[in-house]
Image: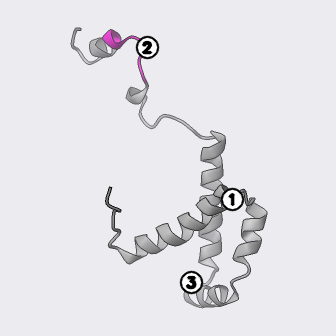
Amino acid sequence: MRKREIRDPRISDFVDGVLGNAAFSHLYGIDRVDTDDILGTFPITLKNEEGDFGEFRTRRTVLEEYGRMAEAISGQNQKPRNSSCRPTADPSQALLKQGRSG
């Protein structure tokens, strides 16, 4: 399978940086506090981002994604997006709901 190329550098940076950092923290069992401490070891990034964005954006976004991933892993906030996506125990009932018969 060919790796899908992300052409927009903003999206590529987000996927490689923010999502990658958050995912690897979970993968290696690094908790949120230690992830925050690790992110604090990049003073040049901190300085540049505070100048450009007025905040250490990488730290904030990585920790936000870390939290979302932690919720997904723990099963919290797992609601079906659409009730019609729920599986039906009896397939004939699904057809009846769609106005067809089996």
Percent position of residue 12, x then y: 42, 72
Q: Earlier in the sequence, mark 3 or mark 1?
A: 1
Amino acid type, mark 3: Phe
Q: Quadrant of the N terminus?
A: bottom left
User: Which contiguous range is marked in magenta?
Assistant: 87-93
Q: Earlier in the sequence, mark 2 or mark 1?
A: 1
Q: Earlier in the sequence, mark 3 or mark 2?
A: 3
Amino acid type, mark 1: Tyr
Measured along the vertical axis of the image, is residue 73 above or below residue 28? above
Residue 45 drawn in magenta: no
Tell us which disc is closer to us: 2 or 1.
Answer: 1
* Helix, strand or loop for disc 1: loop
Percent position of residue 5, x then y: 33, 67
Side (left or right) of 94 relative to 30 = left
Disc 1: which residue:
28
Disc 3: which residue:
53
Amino acid type, mark 2: Ala
Q: Are marks 3 and 1 in contact (CB under 8 Å)?
A: no
Q: Quadrant of the C terminus?
A: top left
Side (left or right) of 34 relative to 25 = right
Disc 2: which residue:
89
